[in-house]
């Protein structure tokens, strides 16, 4: 989230921000809730799943606004990226073929895994065993291959 | 012998849970989808379906409950829903057996082949009539059967029908009992038949050679849609056949023994039913084709729905689903798969946003100060300090407008409050000053009070006086002004610019003239010099000439001249 500055020192956001302000507020509230959720009785690796998921959703929202709906201007898009409303690195991946639905950057970080492989959620459904239900360790993704 | 599979498009609206539910078969569990619809999941097979899975025995009985659909917007949706709601159970039940919808009539437990007629001209083919008056084409050689009469058989089938109708018209048969069937009922049957999806039938893996049969689209429902089956040409014939068919169920099935066993057919019908549960997975994809509405209409209807509910085109799809406002509307089910809906929603969003952008571009840009000043004039009071005022009205859109900074807002508020304490005469004088500062171009005797320039309205001095005392002053001032300046006359800044340009031009011309004069002077001097030089030259020449003119007196004259020249030398 963007750093909160005093109103007198804040530059107004670019034109069109008021249109998406409410939806962004919903996302930030969700994020706050997820952050404040107690993690006592859930497995340790699952504690950050909601955070990843909400951040993914918000990035996706902004990505779609700019690239698919063409609803926001370049200035506003840049401003949003600069103010950390969306993950620019993740969006950069979405523009690449084969990564259109990528859930998070950790899932394609092969160096962090034991066998230098991507996450299980990157495996297309067709190649998984019949009826195999997966949820990836890093963000709880159930499959983000482009072919799914 | 296999009766063909018949996939029915089931709209979401028809998937509402039934009021009297039979228990789920073992292995199935009931869940609520995020859209609010109930679905069923079989953990062992991994199959999920919207339709309630049932045992083969009970599956036919499940449609007893027919809850009425509650249309949230009946006026808009009526036209569409009329097509859905028309068929009553009595007439339509013969052909609706596979339909799982709650508005569908209760199906009969079993359908059985009743009689068969060889189709003349196409020898292996048989036309099989079932107990309920449905019929299908059957090829015993290939062991293929089609509800939809294949195209090549159609003429022959039409011939058979004609022959039969002629036969019926002679009052001899035992089936004449209830000849007077209410017309209404037959109409309804027709509507019911139309409701059947024309294109939704798909060949199943078990019957790979079904494909060719389904190419003839209209004849799929020959066994129910009389008019369609007969090229829609003999209406009365259709009725005649209907009469015959409707009384068929009354007869015991054993009356017409057929060579392929009933058990055979019955087993296959049951198998068809059982398959539905498994095939429901694919229904969403099949559902893309709405039976009654063209694709375009369906999309337009869905877009209307989005319009009517005031959906924010900037919001994400998940928000629309989570809010769930639109689910109650009948138009939501016009598109039957969520994927199709999302696609249309995306398209609608793009259109709507483009529209909004255009609208905004057209709207003139208003100075944000004007509404803020109006707001101050209305709400500001000396009783509130700025922080109090801001806290009190923080929800107002003008207080959150990002075009104004809080600093400015505060400044104007304080100024306004302090001015409210000044005497009226000062305020009037200030107003006068303000009015005078506005140029004649913007404010003249033709300016109307409703269209005062923004320069006035956005000024603190304007709101210091209340409207009752201010307006007469302003009106009087406007009356005293001259008319608007002529088009040729320019406004202050323009005039200044033009004046500058003119001066510049003059200066340049003057410089040019001076330069010309200087050049001319120079030229004249040169000429003068030249002339002088020539004159001198001529003088010298003349002197020389004179010197050269030595007369007869020769030296004497020279000497004389010399003497004469210097008489004083001696």
Image (cartoon, rainbow, N blue to C red):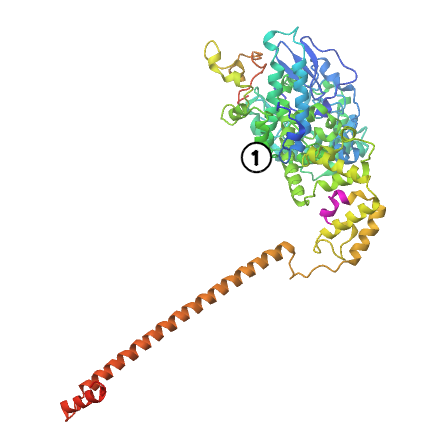
Q: Residue furthest front?
A: B570
Q: Nearer the viewer, residue B567 or B361?
A: B567
Residue at (74, 27) in percent of width and height? B325
Can see residue B4? no
Majority secondary structure of magenta residues: helix
Residue at (64, 23) in percent of width and height? B283
Which quarter of the picture shows residue B248? Answer: top right
Was residue B454 drawn as part of the magenta stretch in this picture? Answer: yes
Span highlighted in magenta in the image: B453-461
Q: Mark 1 sits on what residue?
A: A74
Q: Position of residue A100 (x, y in %)?
A: 53, 25
Looking at the rendered structure, the secondary structure element under dot 1 is helix
Q: Position of residue A69 (x, y in %)?
A: 60, 33
Q: Nearer the viewer, residue B64 or B248?
A: B64
Dot 1: chain letter? A
Position of the N terminus of chain B, as image quadrant, is top right
Q: Residue furthest bottom?
A: B552
């Amino acid at each position: 989230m963007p750093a909160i500055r005093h109103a007198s020192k804040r530059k107004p956001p670019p034109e069109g921000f008021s249109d998406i302000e409410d939806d962004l507020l919903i996302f930030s509230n969700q994020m706050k809730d997820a952050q404040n959720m107690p993690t006592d009785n859930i497995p340790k690796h699952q504690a950050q799943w909601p955070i990843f998921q909400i951040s993914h959703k918000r990035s996706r929202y902004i990505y779609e606004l700019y690239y698919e709906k063409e609803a926001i201007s370049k200035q506003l898009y840049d401003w949003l990226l600069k103010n950390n409303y969306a993950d620019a690195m993740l969006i950069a991946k979405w523009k690449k073929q084969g990564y259109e639905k990528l859930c998070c950057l950790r899932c394609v970080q092969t160096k962090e895994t034991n066998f230098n492989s991507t996450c299980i959620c990157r495996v297309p459904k067709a190649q998984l065993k019949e009826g195999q239900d997966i949820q990836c360790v890093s963000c709880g993704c159930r499959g983000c291959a482009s072919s799914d | 012998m296999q009766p063909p599979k018949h996939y029915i498009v089931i709209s979401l609206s028809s998937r509402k849970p039934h009021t009297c539910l039979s228990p789920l078969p073992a292995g199935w569990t009931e869940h609520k989808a995020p859209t609010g619809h109930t679905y069923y999941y079989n953990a062992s097979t991994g199959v999920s379906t919207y339709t309630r899975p049932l045992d083969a025995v009970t599956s036919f009985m499940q449609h007893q409950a027919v809850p009425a659909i509650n249309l949230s917007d009946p006026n808009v949706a009526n036209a569409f829903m009329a097509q859905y709601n028309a068929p009553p159970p009595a007439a339509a039940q013969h052909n609706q057996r596979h339909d799982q919808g709650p508005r569908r009539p209760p199906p009969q437990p079993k359908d059985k082949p009743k009689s068969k007629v060889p189709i003349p001209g196409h020898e292996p083919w048989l036309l099989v009539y079932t107990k309920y008056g449905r019929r299908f084409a059957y090829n015993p050689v290939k062991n293929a059967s089609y509800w939809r009469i294949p195209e090549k058989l159609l003429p022959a089938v039409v011939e058979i029908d004609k022959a039969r109708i002629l036969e019926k018209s002679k009052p001899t048969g035992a089936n004449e009992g209830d000849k007077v069937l209410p017309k209404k009922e037959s109409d309804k049957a027709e509507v019911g038949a139309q409701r059947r999806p024309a294109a939704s039938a798909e060949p199943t893996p078990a019957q790979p050679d079904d494909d060719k049969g389904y190419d003839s689209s209209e004849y799929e429902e020959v066994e129910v849609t009389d008019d369609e089956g007969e090229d829609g040409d003999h209406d009365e014939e259709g009725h005649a056949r209907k009469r015959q068919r409707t009384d068929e169920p009354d007869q015991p099935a054993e009356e017409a023994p057929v060579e392929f066993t009933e058990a055979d057919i019955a087993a296959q019908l049951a198998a068809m039913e059982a398959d539905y549960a498994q095939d429901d997975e694919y229904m969403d994809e099949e559902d893309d084709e709405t039976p009654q509405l063209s694709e375009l209409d369906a999309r337009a209807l869905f877009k209307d729905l989005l319009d009517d509910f005031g959906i924010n085109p900037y919001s994400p799809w998940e928000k629309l689903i989570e809010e769930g406002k639109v689910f109650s509307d009948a138009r939501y089910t016009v598109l039957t798969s969520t994927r199709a809906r999302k696609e249309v929603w995306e398209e609608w969003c793009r259109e709507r946003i483009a529209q909004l952008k255009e609208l905004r571009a057209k709207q003139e840009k208003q100075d944000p100060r004007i509404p803020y000043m109006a707001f101050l004039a209305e709400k500001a009071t000396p009783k509130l300090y700025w922080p109090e005022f801001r806290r009190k009205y923080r929800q107002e859109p003008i207080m959150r407008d990002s075009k104004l900074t809080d600093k400015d807002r505060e400044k104007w508020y304080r100024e306004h409050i302090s001015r409210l304490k000044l005497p009226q005469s000062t305020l009037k004088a200030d107003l006068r000053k303000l009015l005078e500062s506005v140029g004649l171009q913007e404010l003249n005797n033709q300016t109307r009070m409703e269209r005062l320039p923004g320069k006035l309205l956005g000024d603190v001095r304007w709101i210091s006086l209340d409207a009752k005392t201010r307006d007469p002053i302003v009106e009087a001032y406007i009356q005293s002004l001259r008319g608007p300046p002529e088009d040729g006359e320019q406004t202050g800044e323009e005039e200044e610019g033009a004046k500058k340009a003119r001066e510049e031009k003059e200066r340049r011309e003057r410089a040019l003239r001076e330069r010309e004069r200087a050049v001319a002077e120079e030229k004249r001097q040169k000429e003068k010099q030249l002339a002088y030089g020539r004159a001198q030259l001529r003088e010298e020449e003349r002197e020389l000439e004179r010197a050269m003119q030595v007369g007869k007196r020769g030296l004497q004259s020279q000497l004389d001249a010399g003497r004469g020249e210097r008489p004083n030398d001696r």
